[in-house]
Amino acid sequence: MLDHPLLNLLLPNHCPLCGVDVGDKYSLCQGCWLSLPTLSSQLCGRCGEEVTMSLANGCGHCQGVGVMQDRTLCAFPYEPPISLLLLGAKFADKSRWGAMAAHWGWARLGRELQGLQVDGVVPVPLHEERLRKRGFNQAALLAKPLAKALRRPLLTDLLFRPVATLPQTRLDRKAREANMRGVFRAQWGERAVAEHLLLVDDTMTTGATVREAAAALKKSGVGQVTVMVLAKAMRDTARYGG
Ligand SMILES: [Zn+2]
Ligand SMILES: [Zn+2]
């Protein structure tokens, strides 16, 4: 996998999937762009869960677990080449990786994101220890260029994860919910509390992580929280992230 062309993000102006010349630094060629996977099932607009029918105030899952975000936008299903892009961050130049991930997400959701008029952009944080071990937070790498595109502040010191948790990948759905409960805190300090924030994460599986992060933001007085994730693991492939 290390020699997958997608991981070679050092060739500007070349399509990262097939290598042909393209005008744009982070863009795919037209053929590769058209071949990117699209979400095959309908997702609940509020929580991002797969649903058979969308309801105005969220789905049964929203009601059951008490979803705190107002809406959830997903750009892609967690499938190649999106999954390869996400797994490849650790091998790539971090700011280039963030720019590319944001560029692809923006191409799918940019218009919708602009229409929402958010006041700021918040990446889902990692616990301090995990951040130190890993060296970077993928959600923050993705959120930075999105904040720039939206011309809104990137708020990296607002949301904290004071509680260390077990890696979500080894847990089933029920255990993931319990593992994430109450792990985030939002601290505004002297700042005025924002009315509407965009909460950004790279992947979403059960949605427990973004739900808890949204809950902390709401608890701190934020009026509206919109969640944006680059990739949603669909039920049959739900193995990654939180
Ligand atoms: Zn291409
Ligand atoms: Zn829902």
Image: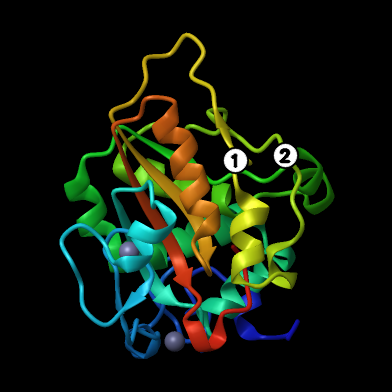
Residue 47: x and y, percent?
A: 36, 60
> What residue sits 67% from the left and 59% below the top?
93
Q: Quadrant of residue 198?
A: top left
> Amino acid under label 2?
Val
Q: How is the image coloured?
A: rainbow
In the image, residue 183 lies at what x, y percent? 63, 41
- The mark that comes first in sequence, 1 or 2, is 2
Distance between the alpha carbons at the discs numbered 1 and 2 = 8 Å
In the image: residue 227, left or right of residue 208: left
Query: Which residue corresponds to mark 2?
Result: 163
Q: Position of residue 230 (x, y in %)?
A: 45, 65
Q: Is residue 76 left or right of residue 135?
A: left
Label 1 belongs to which residue?
182
Q: Is residue 14 visible?
A: yes
Q: Is residue 47 above or below residue 221?
A: below
Q: Looking at the image, which is closer to me, 69 or 126?
A: 69
Q: Amino acid at mark 1?
A: Gly
